[in-house]
Image (cartoon, rainbow, N blue to C red):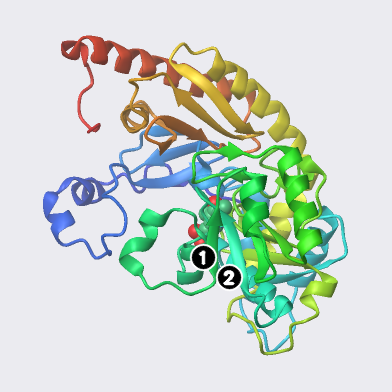
Amino acid sequence: MAASPAATTAHDTAAHRAAMDAPADLERCPLWPTYRAPSVKFVRGSGSELWDVHGKRYLDMLSGLAVTSLGHAHPAVTEAVAAQAATLVHVSNLFGSEPGPEVARTLDRLLGGGGQVFFCNSGAEANEAAIKLARRFGGRGRHRVLSAFGSFHGRTLATLHATGQPAKHEVFQPLPEGFAHVAWHDIDDLDTHLDDTVAAVLLEVVQGEGGVNPVDAGYLQAVRRLCDERGALLVIDEVQTGLGRTGAWFAHQHADVRPDIVSMAKALGNGVPIGACWARTEVAAVLQPGEHGTTYGGQPLAAAAAAAVLDVLEREDAPGRARRAGERLRQALEALSAVAQVRGLGLLLAAELVEGTDAPTVAARALERGLVVNAVTPTALRFAPSLLIDDAEIDEAVAILAAVLDEVAAATTDPSAASTGGGAP
Ligand SMILES: *Cc1c(COP(=O)(O)O)cnc(C)c1O
C-alpha cells in the first residue's frame, strides 16, 4: 500500500482553520502546557516537504528533530508498517516475534559486531537501559555515571540527572543519586573525576540539543583509554547522531573508537517510536531474565518500521549521502554574510549567526516563509534534514534563509523596514 497523495487538501477545511485560529481553542487546550503553543499545524508530509492545515508548503530542514531521516511518508516504510499492521502488531515479550531479531543483527553488524541489542521505545529509555546495565555490570560501589556539561540524555528522572544542564534539574530535585558532570571536551577534568566508583562515562559525540558541538577524535580516544585504565564502561549516546546522520553509521566511528554500550532511537523508526541499546555481549551477559524489560520493546510493528528503515538507509548509502549533502549545505551556509561559523558533522549542522542576530527570530521568520529550521541556541540555527534531501532542496532552503537573514538585518538597522511582521518575539 502506498501513501495517498490525494489527501492534499482534505485536511484544509474551515473547521481545521477555525480550530487553529480561535483563541478559545487555546483556553480549552486538552494538552499539558509542556510545549509552547505551536504557530503551525502540519497535516501531511512527503520527502523533505510538509503541508500545514491551510495547504501551505514548507521545506523541512529539521526532520522532526533528526527523526525522519528518510523524509516523510517514505513508501518503503509506509508499506512495511501497513503490511505488519495487517499481520501482527504486538504479542508482548513473553513470546518471540519477527522482525526484531533481524533488526538487532543488522544494528550489530553496522556497529562492527560482537554485541547484543535491547529494544525500547525512545531515546531516554535507551539511555535508561544503558545506565541500568552499566550499574549491573559495575556492581555495588561502582555505580556512578559521569556525563558532560551541556549534554542531553532524556527526560526521565535518571536521564534528566545525566543531562548536564543543571537549570533543568532544579524544580525536580531530589533526582536519583549517582550522577555527576564533567567539563565538556576536557580530558583533565574527566581524569580528575573518573575514580573506582564510576560505572560508566556517558557521552554524545556531537552534543545535539546542547548546540551541535562535536568533540575531536583525539578526545574520544583519550576517554576510551581512561575508561580502560580505570575499569569504567564507555557509553555513547547516539540517539541523535546514529544511523548515518553524521556521515558514518555511528558518529563514534569517525574517531575509530569502540564503545561498550551504544544507545539510539530517533532515526531508527523514521517516526515510528522505537529505541535500542546495543552492548558488547560480555557486558549484556550480566543481565538475568526479568531484570530489565518493557511491554512494547521490539514489538512487530515498530520492528517492521526499523527493518524497512535500515534496508533503505543501506541501499541509499545514507552515510555517504549525509557527507556529500552536508558538505553542500555547509558551504552554502558559510557563504552567507550573516553566518559567522558552521559546525557539526554530515547533516547535523548548526549555523552560528553574526552578533546581534537573534536565532529564534530568524527561525520564526523562516517558518513564515515556508522553511522549517530550529534555533538550537539563542544565536544558532540547527539543520538536520532528511538524509535523502536533494541538491535543489538544499539550494532552495539556503535561498529562503538568505532572504530571511537580509530581512532581519534590515529590521535591526531600521525597525520601520520590518515587512511581514508577526510571529517573532
Ligand atoms: C532526543 C535525545 C534523547 C532523548 O530521546 P527521547 O526519544 O526524546 O526520549 C537522548 N539523547 C539524545 C542525544 C537526544 O538527542
The disc at residue 159 is 1
Q: Residues within 10 Å of mark 1 (few under 14, many from 20)?
A: many
Secondary structure at numbered mark 2: helix
Q: Position of residue 162 (x, y in %)?
A: 52, 62
The image quarter containing residue 409 is: top left
Question: Considering only order in the chain, which callout, 1 or 2, is on the residue closer to the N terminus?
Answer: 2
Confirm whether residue 1 shows in the render: no
Give, as a three-letter code, the residue at label 2: Glu
The image quarter containing residue 135 is: bottom right
The residue nearer to you, when weighing 134 against 193, is 193
Answer with left or right where residue 237 lies relative to residue 379: right
The disc at residue 4 is none
Circle 2 residue: 128
Mark 2–mark 1 distance (CA, rounded to whole Å): 7 Å
Q: Residue at x 70, y 72 (%)?
A: 118
Answer with left or right where residue 100 lies relative to residue 41: right
- Cβ of mark 1 under 8 Å from ligand 1: the answer is yes
The reply to whether dot 2 and dot 1 touch (C-beta < 8 Å) is yes
Q: Position of residue 233 (x, y in %)?
A: 73, 64
The residue nearer to you, when weighing 83 against 66, is 66
